[in-house]
Amino acid sequence: RQKKLCNPDIVWEEILQEFNRGVPPEDPAHGGPGTDHYGLSKALLTAYTMLLAKQLASRNISVYCLSPGYIETNMTKHWGGGKKPEDGTVSLRYCLFEADASHSGWFFGSDAKRSPLHFLRNPGEPEFDGTVDW
């Protein structure tokens, strides 16, 4: 499943199939209440970003997926450790003002560095080079 959702040649029917499959209890990705579907929604959104990037390239439209990082909001303030909302704009500003068309379809972490789709890259760690060793 992970390979399918990280495949740059993914098609809409495959994304929809994974959405409809959801995260059944026997799936290794099934976590605590709410966490399993949260992770799947992020994976599907990133896969859709790759698909849109391909579909819109001929129209000179770039598409990026980005993470602001863990931001302190009304929803998260009770867990602590979040960044201030204004500190969550680094990747957004990069995609708006610095990224170019060759970056379309990429996922950017909260530090505006290219991040992998298949594992977590923490801010400050080396940028993902696009190589996946399956």
Image (cartoon, rainbow, N blue to C red):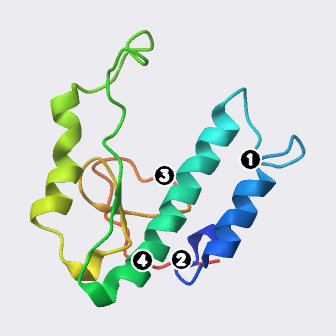
Q: Which residue is drawn at 51% across and 57% down?
A: 45
* Mark 2: secondary structure: loop
Q: Mark 1 points at which residue?
A: 29
Q: Residue at x 33, y 54 (%)?
A: 125
- In the rendered view, does 120 fall on the left or right side of 115? right
Q: Picture coordinates of residue 84 (x, y %)?
A: 21, 25
Q: What residue type is labelled 2?
A: Val
Q: Is residue 82 above or below residue 70?
A: above
Give the class, few, some or many, for how many residues have Cα within 10 Å of label 3's Cα (few <14, many ≥20). Answer: few
Q: Which of marks 1 and 2 is nearer the N terminus?
A: 1
The residue indicated by pointer 3 is: 120
Q: Name the residue under label 4.
A: 130
Out of 119 and 2, give the one closest to the viewer. 2
Between marks 4 and 1, how big is the CA–CA gap? 23 Å
**In the rendered structure, are the residues bearing label 4 and label 2 in contact, judged by CB atoms less than 8 Å apart?**
yes
Report, in whole angstroms, how far the alpha carbon at label 4 lies from the one at label 2.
Answer: 6 Å
Is residue 17 depicted above or below 66 in this figure?
below
Residue labelled with disc 2: 132
